[in-house]
Each structure stands twice: as C-alpha cells, then as structure tokens.
Image (cartoon, rainbow, N blue to C red):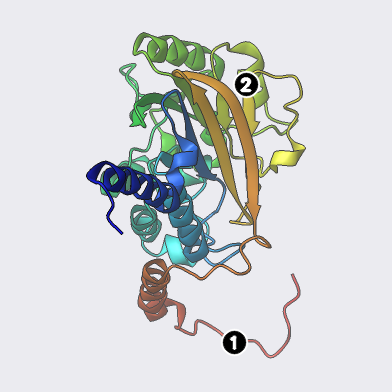
Amino acid sequence: MFIGSKKKLSLLLILSIIVTMVFAPVTGVFADENSIVVTIVHTNDTHSRVDAGIGFAKVATKIKEIKDSNPNTLVIDAGDTLHGQTFATISKGESIIKLMNAIGYDVMTPGNHDFNYGQERLLELAGQANFPIITANLIKKDGTTAMEPYVIKEVGGLKIGIFGLSTPETAYKTNPLNVEGLTFASPVDISQKMVAELKEKGVNTIIALVHLGIDKESTDTSYLVRDKVDGIDLIIDGHSHTLLGDIDNAGKETIIVSTGEYNNNLGIVNLKFEDGQLKAIEPSLFTKDDAAELEPDEEIAALMNETTEKNKVITSVVVGETDVVLGG
C-alpha cells in the first residue's frame, strides 16, 4: 500500500514525539519553562564516623541517585566533620577532606570540633578541599574574616546565596590556643550583614549554613538567628545533634533543618522556584533504614579501606595489656 510523503512525515513526527516522551530524562520533573526544583543534600555532626549510620559509601550512592534525578543539586555540610575518630585524627582531617572531595561536596561550614587541630591546620584543610569552607563570623585581629564568608552557587540559572556561621562556643569548646587571636562575632549581627550583601548580589534565595544548634543552654542558637533576622529562607544547622522532627518550624517563614548525628540520616531539601521566586521548601530525612538496600559506592568504599589500612601502622601497635576487664 502506497503512503504519501505527507502521511510519512506525520507518522515520523508522531513517532518522534512518542520516543521523546518515553525516553525523556527524569530530570524533566524538576524543571520546566517557568519552574525549577533545587535539591539540597546536607549532613552535620558526622564526627568522622565514616562507617556509622548510613556510612559514607552509601551516602555517596544516594547522592549519585539524587544527582541523576536532578542535576540541580547541592551537597552541603554543617560542621563537626573533620575530627572525632582515628580514621580522621591520624591524618589531622585530610582523610575526611579526600572523602568529601570524592563524594562531591559543594560547601561546608566549620563546627567547633573542626578547630581541634588548630586554626592553621583548618586553613590547610580548606586549601585541600575542592569546595569552599565558609564562615562569616570568624574575625581576625585586623577586622577581616579568617575564611570566606559566603558563596553564591549558580544552579539551573538561579543564584543560591549561602553564608556560614560558626558557634561562638568554639572559643571554649576547643582548646583556646586553637582560636587564639580570633573572635566569633554575633551570629545575629553578621547574619543581618550577610543578608543585605547577598540581596545586593541579586540572589534568588538565601541559605544560612550554620553550626549553632538549638540547645537551651546555648545563647547563640539557630532559633535566635531565625527570629531576629529577616530574609533567610533556609537554615541548615548542626551542633546540637537535633533531628528534623524535633525542630519547631510551625508557622515560620525561615525553615531550620538538621539530620541528628553520626551519619544516621541524610538531609534532603527540595526548594521549589517559579519564575525565579522561591515558592516552597520541602525538607525530609533519608534514614539508615531507608538506606538498607543501597549498595555502597565502590570508589568511596575503596578510599575508606585504603585509609584504614594505612592507619593500621599505628592502630595495630600494642601499647599495653590488662588481665582484668576495665569498666568505664
């Protein structure tokens, strides 16, 4: 049966449309002409427990899955990451930076324990990182910031402004010699300054990446920043090891998120934009149970094993023996 050229063309067009619909990438659900979703993946207070909870290797797998679904994704850490276990302390944090580089972190703010190797070592680690380590309220004697105060990430045609804050409690929650000559300025005052500066830069949203926490014993908390500073859309928090469900976000324009501690959860926040304006913030936790069926990322697992094997030169040394159980 003869088919005319016009009918052939029509059939080809229909076939092309069907193929496009069937094989279109899943990223289509995250962006169209007027709207876009930016996904923030966040961690805090892992304390270098690379095998605990979900574990860094499975975290890497999940991050790859998220990025495959939505390339408009940022990976962020809210501190207390570089210190805590022999895995990290033997290399003074370098092993953790290598893992974070391999996983693909985009930005971090230092927690009080990240100063435990001393301020010079923290700056060295920042130099080794493929991502900025930022904090806006860490002030040197000459009045300048000791680290970069903020970063603007361009994602999906949007400008995401992120500034960092470290807890003033660092002054006495690390060895004071580690922060000698440094001042931790008021998080509220600095936040107001950062919001104004980032707005002048024309950002589409402002994120405060903070290590402040919400402990009742603390003075400078993320609650205080939220309640005293206008213009922050999202606060990604650390320090108090708080779970998302334990944070009071009811009726608040600024949303605070946190994952708890020790890699037990991975934080995921979807920021929904329409015509460049932030319209919705949707936070959630991906838990250890959720990750049960995930396969560990081979590259990250190999990197972790390599570090562990190197560390055995020190960790395998017998320093003493006891004939009785030592209760503690």
Of pointers 2 and 1, the one earlier in the residue sequence: 2
The image position of residue 217, as x and y in percent, is 73, 31
- Residue 171 versus residue 237: which sits nearer the camera? 237
At 56% from the left and 16% from the top, the residue drawn is 188
Q: Is residue 243 left or right of residue 300?
A: right
Q: Which residue is mark 1?
A: 321
User: Residue 238: where, in percent of width, then height?
Assistant: 59, 39
> Where residue 123 is drawn, which disc sits there?
none
Q: Amino acid at mark 1?
A: Glu
Location of residue 251 by image quarter: top right
The C terminus appears in which quarter of the rendering? Answer: bottom right
As drawn, 162 above or below 54: above
In the displayed orientation, state which residue is furthest to the bottom.
323
Q: Residue 253, relative to residue 53: is it above or below?
A: above
Tell me the kind of residue under disc 2. Answer: Thr
Which residue has dot 2 on it? 254
Q: Is residue 166 visible?
A: no
Q: Residue at x 54, y 64 (%)?
A: 55
Residue for point 52% across, 57% down: 84
Q: Is residue 35 visible?
A: yes
User: Foreground: 16 or 101?
Assistant: 16
- Would you call the spot at circle 2 few (<14 residues within 10 Å), some (14-19), or many (20 or more)? many
Asked where in the image residue 2 lies, by quadrant, the reply is: bottom left
**Which corner quadrant holds the N terminus?**
bottom left
Q: What is the spatial separation of the Cα atoms under label 2 and label 1, in whole angstroms?
A: 54 Å
Front residue of 275/140: it is: 275
Question: Can you say whether 289 is above or below 168 in the image?
Answer: below
Q: Nearer the viewer, residue 171 or 288?
A: 288
Residue at the outermost left position: 5
Mark toward the viewer: 2 or 1? 2
> Would you call the spot at circle 1 few (<14 residues within 10 Å), some (14-19), or many (20 or more)?
few
